[in-house]
Amino acid sequence: MARRAASLLSHWSSRVFSVELDGAPTYFAVREKRRGEDAPRVFDAVRRGDRCFSVLVWSSDRVRSARFHAQLKDRLLGRLPAGCRLSPMSSFLPNVRDSLIKGYFLKADSPSSSPTERLLRDFSQRDPLLVCSYLNPDNDQVWTQQLWPDADRDGTPRVLYVVPSEAPQEHPSTLNLINSDVFYSFEEAQAVLKQCGDIIPEAASVLELLPSRAEARSEPDFPVIVVEGLDATGKTTLTQALRDALGAALLPSPPRCLSPWRARFDQEPPLIRRAFYALGNYITAENMRQEATKAPVIVDRYWHSTAAYAIGTALSGPPSSLPAEGSEVYRWPGDLLQPSLVVVLTLDGEERKRRLRNRAQGETEEEQQLDHNHLFRLRVEEAYHRIRGPACVTVDAGPSADQVLQQVLLLIRDKCQL
Ligand SMILES: Nc1ncnc2c1ncn2[C@@H]1O[C@H](COP(=O)(O)OP(=O)(O)O)[C@@H](O)[C@H]1O
Ligand SMILES: Nc1ccn([C@@H]2O[C@H](COP(=O)(O)OP(=O)(O)O)[C@@H](O)[C@H]2O)c(=O)n1
């Protein structure tokens, strides 16, 4: 832990900081203070006289960091004085993978800054937090950042100038996607659940259900067809109709054996939750392999869902903020069985909502977010289309259920010689 802190601090001046102030990201860096120089303005959205702080989560234990970050907002809001405003914040080394650390930027009204300061000092001594305070001593928008001595540990307060920085080319969260949000091997996902063992007892039960190891191995005897799409695009309807039309086996994903643990892992931060879903795919792959010795196999969601939802959640903004097409984040895990065909159902937003209303059954929290957040839905759909290895074939799910079935049957006959 101490070594990671030392390396964090030694690269501190190379870091870029990002704060969502009034809905727009402000990027800034810090550097040594030069005497007598006019520093540029940075925090236009911060009122004169406001006292600011940043609280960033850092720990070499990634499970601890992820869980601590997930609780941090509530913990801060529960104890901070009224009038203190929180904005999401992150810090990263440009182009350095896994360098992103996350936390919050706090604006405290001047009169109430002392209790905030006391509380943060208390937090920084007990918790895996790196706290900085921001001052504009001359009240002219020239900001300085001070790493608190107790965070710096060598006893010398470091006072740095805050200077504007350019927006990075890629969304900063892209730096930590691989093996934190999306897992590209059985071992990587399994390692997260093993690490959770002492804090989430259910992890042991999930680990027991896993195959001893994973490998993509040879093609199954019968074709395996995966149906993907956002909630209410008609996956259940289509997969059942395909099962009946082809005399196929129908597999749900995540697999049924994980049902007792799903709600538990849905409460966890992305690192743990996504590892759980990633492992579910390896169980599904074993089931696919077995069933495909006897008949065609239809699967309701698989790797495309796991990766596209994870990418769409980790990033923000319009689909243009996603990693570019061809990026390694869209690759297929080398040890995961590839289906013969992946069909993605797409549906006009209004029709999807109408079907959701008609069905009126419980949505996952993530699915509710899809409804409330149009951009999130667009990001997930775009990520679906960028995933490679098998790429997906898009089918318009707007026509009647029978027409959609006939179209997909044609595709299967064409691509899988069935
Ligand atoms: N092609 C279709 N045309 C009209 N309604 C449909 C069609 N396919 C499915 N539905 C209806 O839309 C709702 C959502 O379909 P469902 O198969 O449950 O979607 P998913 O499994 O993707 O969430 C259901 O009420 C279903 O009867
Ligand atoms: N193979 C899978 C299947 C589901 N999932 C997750 O499960 C959620 C959707 O599951 P669901 O059971 O609500 O889907 P529907 O088939 O009901 O639309 C998505 O939010 C994904 O995050 C996954 O990550 N990987």
Image (spheres, rainbow, N blue to C red):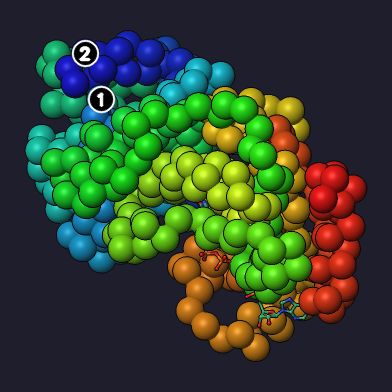
Q: Are marks 2 and 1 in contact (CB under 8 Å)?
A: yes
- Queried on whether the Cβ of the residue with tag 2 lies below 8 angstroms from ligand 2, the answer reads no
**Where on the image, by quarter, is ligand 1?**
bottom right
Q: Amino acid at mark 1?
A: Ser
Q: Which is more toward the observer, 16 or 382?
A: 382
Q: Which is more toward the observer, 294 or 273?
A: 294
How crowded is the residue under tag 2: few (<14 C-alpha within 10 Å), some, or many (20+)?
few
Residue 25 can be seen in this image: no
Residue 263 can be seen in this image: yes
Mark 2 vs 1, N-terminal side? 2
- Residue 154 position (above or below residue 327): above
User: Where, by quadrant of the figure, is residue 162 drawn?
Assistant: top left
> Looking at the figure, which quarter contains the N terminus?
top left
User: Where does the image place residue 16, in percent across and percent down from the top left?
Assistant: 49, 26
- Residue 37 position (above or below residue 81): above
The residue at the far front in this view is 294
Q: Which mark is residue 60?
A: 1
Residue pictured at 67% horizontal, 39% vertical = 221
Residue pictured at 31% horizontal, 46% vertical = 209
Q: For mark 2, what is the residue? A: 3
Q: Answer with left or right where residue 162 lies relative to residue 52.
A: right
Q: Amino acid at mark 2?
A: Arg
